[in-house]
């Protein structure tokens, strides 16, 4: 049994059995712990299922002890920008995630909303993002293109903006998108973009920080390959 002393009265806190098993497995271990951060914005289960299918163990959690032991982090999510940030604040996870990513250089993959939260701000709301990427997220305008419906929904081929990428191979790849907000084409550290009447960034890589606008967990073989590349970093 894992016991943790409480500050002040020095009583012992017995963690629930699931948390005990997780911590016992990974504390003082070389086993890679992939944590999908659970900040109550959905789609964590589908990502976990995909990772399990391609042979990677992972944990969905909002527990600080588990997140602090993570070797890799995934910040997914669907919904509004402000709601995502407020949920992270409510769970008191902002400071811990900052420490893991900025100080400890833990690799993190942002998916869809998770990618957008890595920006400075979004036109979707008033909250500030993590600011790891020096860019603001913009809203698709209804009249910018007759060829694109909003929200953008469905399969799109991506074009690489850099010859070398840790997430993408050089072959032609397509992924599944669902979104109404986007990163401009001139986003720093962009590695992939969508070619359309309005070209926009759909993936970036900045040292240990990775973001993709599409859903790799819904993108079949191409999504599996991308997730494998991240998990093997």
Image (cartoon, rainbow, N blue to C red):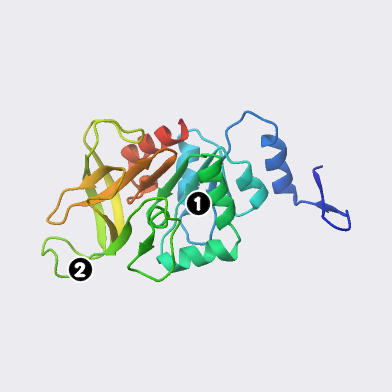
Q: Position of residue 151 (x, y in %)?
A: 26, 64
Which residue is labeled 2 in the image? 141
Residue at the image position 52 percent from the left and 39 percent from the top: 106
Classify residue 36 as left or right of residue 31. left
Q: Secondary structure at mark 1?
A: helix
Q: Position of residue 103 (x, y in %)?
A: 55, 43
Depth check: give the residue in front, 122 or 193: 122
Residue at the image position 51 percent from the left and 45 percent from the top: 102
Name which of mark 2 and mark 1 comes first in the sequence.
1
Mark seen at residue 45: 1
Classify residue 172 as left or right of residue 231. left
Q: Position of residue 215 (x, y in %)?
A: 36, 49
Residue 35 position by quadrant: top right
Classify residue 83 as left or right of residue 170. right
- Image quarter where the N terminus lies is top right
Residue 30 shows up from this direction: yes
**102 up-or-down from 32: above or below:** below
Q: Circle 1: is it few (<14), some (14-19), or many (20+) Cα within 10 Å?
A: some
Classify residue 14 as left or right of residue 156. right
Residue 198 position by quadrant: bottom left
Q: Secondary structure at mark 2?
A: loop
Residue 173 position by quadrant: top left
Q: Are marks 2 and 1 in contact (CB under 8 Å)?
A: no
Depth check: give the residue in front, 30 or 177: 30
> What is the count of numbered marks?
2
Depth check: give the residue in front, 52 or 103: 103
Viewer-nearest of labels 2 and 1?
2
Q: Circle 2: is it few (<14), some (14-19), or many (20+) Cα within 10 Å?
A: few
Residue at the image position 61 percent from the left and 60 percent from the top: 92
Residue at the image position 51 percent from the left and 67 percent from the top: 86
């Amino acid at each position: 049994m894992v016991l943790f002393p409480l500050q002040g009265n020095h009583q012992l806190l017995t963690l629930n059995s699931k948390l005990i098993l997780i911590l016992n497995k990974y504390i003082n271990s070389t086993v890679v712990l992939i944590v999908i951060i659970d900040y109550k914005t959905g789609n964590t289960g589908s990502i976990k299922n995909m990772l399990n299918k391609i042979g990677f163990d992972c944990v969905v959690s909002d527990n600080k002890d588990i997140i602090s032991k993570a070797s890799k982090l995934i910040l997914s999510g669907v919904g509004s920008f402000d709601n995502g940030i407020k949920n992270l604040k409510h769970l008191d996870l902002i400071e811990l995630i900052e420490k893991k990513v900025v100080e400890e250089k833990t690799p993190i993959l942002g998916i869809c909303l998770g990618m957008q939260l890595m920006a400075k701000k979004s036109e979707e709301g008033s909250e500030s993002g993590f600011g790891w990427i020096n860019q603001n997220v913009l809203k698709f305008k209804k009249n910018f293109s007759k060829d694109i419906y909003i929200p953008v929904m469905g399969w799109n081929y991506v074009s690489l903006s850099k010859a070398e990428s840790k997430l993408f191979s050089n072959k032609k790849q397509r992924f599944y998108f669902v979104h109404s907000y986007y990163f401009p084409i001139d986003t720093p550290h962009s590695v992939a973009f969508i070619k359309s009447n309005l070209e926009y960034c759909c993936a970036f890589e900045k040292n240990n920080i990775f973001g993709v606008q599409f859903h790799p967990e819904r993108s079949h073989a191409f999504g599996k390959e991308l997730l494998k590349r991240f998990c093997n970093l």
